[in-house]
Amino acid sequence: MGLSNSTGKNEAQPTKQIFILSGQSNMAGRGGVDSHKHWDGVIPPECSPDPSKIFRLNAHLRWEVARDPLHQDIDAKKTCGVGPGMSFANAVKERVGVVGLVPCAVGGTGIKQWARGTHLYENMVKRARAAAHGGEIKALLWYQGESDATSHHDADCYKENLEKLIHNVRADLHLPSLPIIQVAIASGEGRFIEKIREVQKGIELPNVVCVDANGLQLKEDNLHLTTHAQVELGHMLAEAYLTHFLPHSSHT
């Protein structure tokens, strides 16, 4: 109803292959953000904007050229820096064509805050539906769980909540086999990180794959990925997408 992205300018844009970016702070991106909450402004070459190939849906549901910080008007109460989205988009664009990124991640959020009916969940679905007017939704990239690793109860409920989230997103977007690429967390202060990781790596739903952030370089806060690590993660997500959901067709 009255979507802002139905202007003439937006209709003239090419059809996009759309990827939803969601979860908490490491998806929103804290690469290059120091302890005083200042972003250093450094954009690695792997995260360079591409005005003809990579777009993002802004907070007003309008498409614009994508550039870091991708989440600055979405995770607006925090200082955002480099996340995995731009290096992912640059790594897949030659194979998929024009990329449309839909940032939805918000720092410090537990998975219960992403249950159907919550503001975060409904906003993600609304943004994804708006984006779909400009192309085809190809995958949800999900990086979340650090906030659920601090409580025994939250860790115990994580599997059920994550599976419910996947079912709900697919149902509400009418995409029953929507690819989900989730990241196994590797950081945080919680005592139950390993329990969350086991759940993330053990999800056996169809079209759900997991990449492991373990071993990626962390900032001094021992929670957030460095800029370099975010670039690496974007490449890992791209490889997972291209390998599992866009295989080379064999003509030999």
Image (spheres, rainbow, N blue to C red):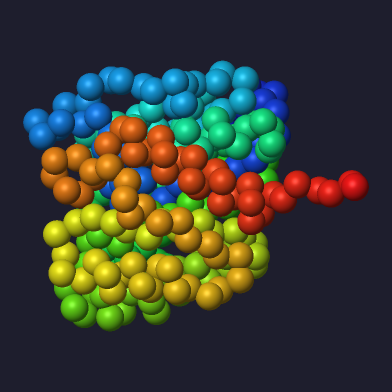
Total labels: the figure holds 0
**Residue 117 seen from this side:** yes
Percent coordinates x, y for residue 32 in the rendering: 25, 29
**Whether residue 106 can be seen here:** no
Q: Residue at x 56, y 34 (%)?
A: 91
User: Hey, which residue is sitting farthest left in the picture?
Assistant: 36
Nearer the observer, 194 or 3: 194
Q: Residue furthest front?
A: 252
Residue 98 lies left or right of residue 111; in this view the side is right
Name the side, left or right, on which 104 lies relative to 187: right
Q: In the image, what residue occupies the spot 23% across and 22% down?
A: 40
Vertical relation: 29 (above or below) 151: above
Question: Which residue is farthest right?
Answer: 252
Q: Position of residue 123 (x, y in %)?
A: 42, 52
Give me the residue at 55% from left, 43% from top: 238
Q: Position of residue 25 (x, y in %)?
A: 28, 47
Residue 240 placement, left or right of 146: right
User: Residue 157, relative to residue 43: is it above or below?
Assistant: below
Residue at the (90%, 47%) spot, across then down? 252
Q: Is residue 174 left or right of residue 27?
A: right
Image: 8 above or below 72: above
Q: Quadrant of residue 225?
A: top left
Of residues 244 and 114, the one nearer the viewer is 244
Q: Position of residue 124 (x, y in %)?
A: 45, 52
The image quadrant of residue 160 is bottom left
Question: Looking at the image, which is closer to me, 154 or 104?
Answer: 154
Camera-side residue: 83 or 19?
83
